[in-house]
Amino acid sequence: MAAGYLDILRARHAARLLTGTLVGRLPNGTAPIAIVLFTRAEGGSYALAGALAAVYGLGTAVGQPLLGRAVDLYGQPRVQLPAAVLSAIGMALLALVGFGSLPLAYGAVALAGVATPPLEGGLRALWPSVLGSEDRVHRAYAMDAVAQEVMFTVGPLLVTLLVSLWSPAAALLVINAIGVLGALSVVLSEPSRTWRSAPREAHWLGALRSPGLLALLGSFFFVGLALGSITVAGVAYADDRGQESVYGWLMAALGLGALIGGAVYGARQWSGPPERRLRVIVALLALGYLPLTLTPGVVAMTVLAGVAGVFLAPAIACSFIVVDRHAPRGTVTEAFSWLVTTFGVGAAAGTAVAGPAVELGGTAWSFAVAGAGGVAALLVLLATGRVLAAPGRGAVAVRGSENDRNGAVEPGFSSGHQA
């Protein structure tokens, strides 16, 4: 297992691109907790903190696909670095000005969200040209999904450490400065500088003109909803037990399960259409969420949370390959950015729905939202099976280009021209 991932990291530029992307995404991965801590330190209410975090999330949802399309049109350096600087300026403005003017605070947070660089989509567009072979690209997608779990675990810990050493304002400034350095490392690399999008058909819908991509986005909205609801349900469960630390155990177990699942999934080669495999993985994901509604004792619940997380990273890794197969030529960065946006909007919807569910029916109902989200994600994939079975057709791309379908599929499956 480890040998396969080491093979990826030994490839020229691979370690730099992965590390730079993760570091560059730190501001995005830590923004919610950083905003909440800063707001509370400045005397603001939880309601204000939640509103600011929501504005940031909405800004990110709007900005990611727009910036992704700009990357496809103008290249990575011209878009990624200026966006990272603008986003950091927005957060720095919030940290330095505070809440003397609420409109200015909201504007600063909105700027930071909208300008968040689409580094995720950019990295996935680069993997085929950096790694070349199908199995290595497949393994890189899985490693990418695992690395996300690490970032979302380490990032909040880094923020709390900076707050304890200095202040919430300093944490905002340092995290965003680090993010700019990460983006700079990526865009100065040779693969990023030389990457060019495949020729694209001018169309106002861009990547969204692909029916297969729309089907996938519909499914992953509900996967995001399930995950978002668990964050609220976990808090409610911890409150029921009268132990705040229980929430940390549940989230840690969920993340550990995802790490294990992603590592195992990426360690082997898969044959057959990834669309079919994605249906199986999402079915197992939904099956893992349903037992959470039993809300047993802490030990058993922690085990169930770990099991529920096992199929999350494989589902994300497999979705990356499906995105690349269905994205219209010349829109792959935008398509990946739409996946990020849809997943994030779904997570926000999950947190919004789980709250009232706790009020109406208790903790079990809030976990039921997660189960329902997983089932809905599966139903979307089943209902759109025929659309997903026909990857987008287009002129043959040069191997290693951003939309080379032969360089971004899994072993054993010939893509591009199915009957």
Image (tube, helix red, strand yellow):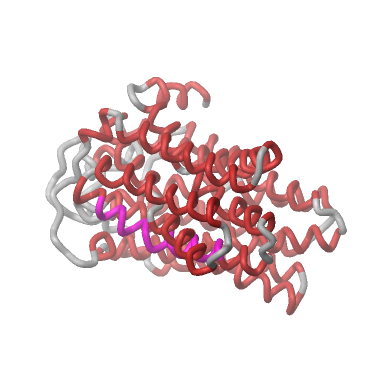
Q: Is residue 361 left or right of residue 211?
A: right
> Over which residues does the magenta segment extend?
52-70
The overriding secondary structure of the stretch rendered in magenta is helix
Question: Which residue is found at the position 33% from the left and 42% from the top?
Answer: 81
**Residue 419 shows in the view:** no
* Residue 257 pos. (x, y %): 63, 43
Quadrant location of residue 67?
bottom left
Quadrant location of residue 24?
top left
Number of numbered callouts drawn:
0
> Considering only vertical position in the picture, is 208 above or below 418?
below
Question: Which residue is found at the position 57% from the left and 57% from the top?
Answer: 98
* Residue 45 pos. (x, y %): 68, 66
* Residue 396 pos. (x, y %): 14, 45
Quadrant location of residue 205?
bottom left
> Which one is nearer the viewer's eye here, 287 or 130?
130
Is-magenta flag for residue 6? Answer: no
**Residue 249 shows in the view:** yes
Question: Which residue is found at the position 19% from the left and 41% from the top?
Answer: 196
> Considering only vertical position in the picture, is 255 above or below 4?
below
> Which one is nearer the viewer's eye here, 415 or 5?
5
Question: Which residue is found at the position 41% from the left and 58% from the top?
Answer: 111
Q: Is residue 228 left or right of residue 302?
A: left
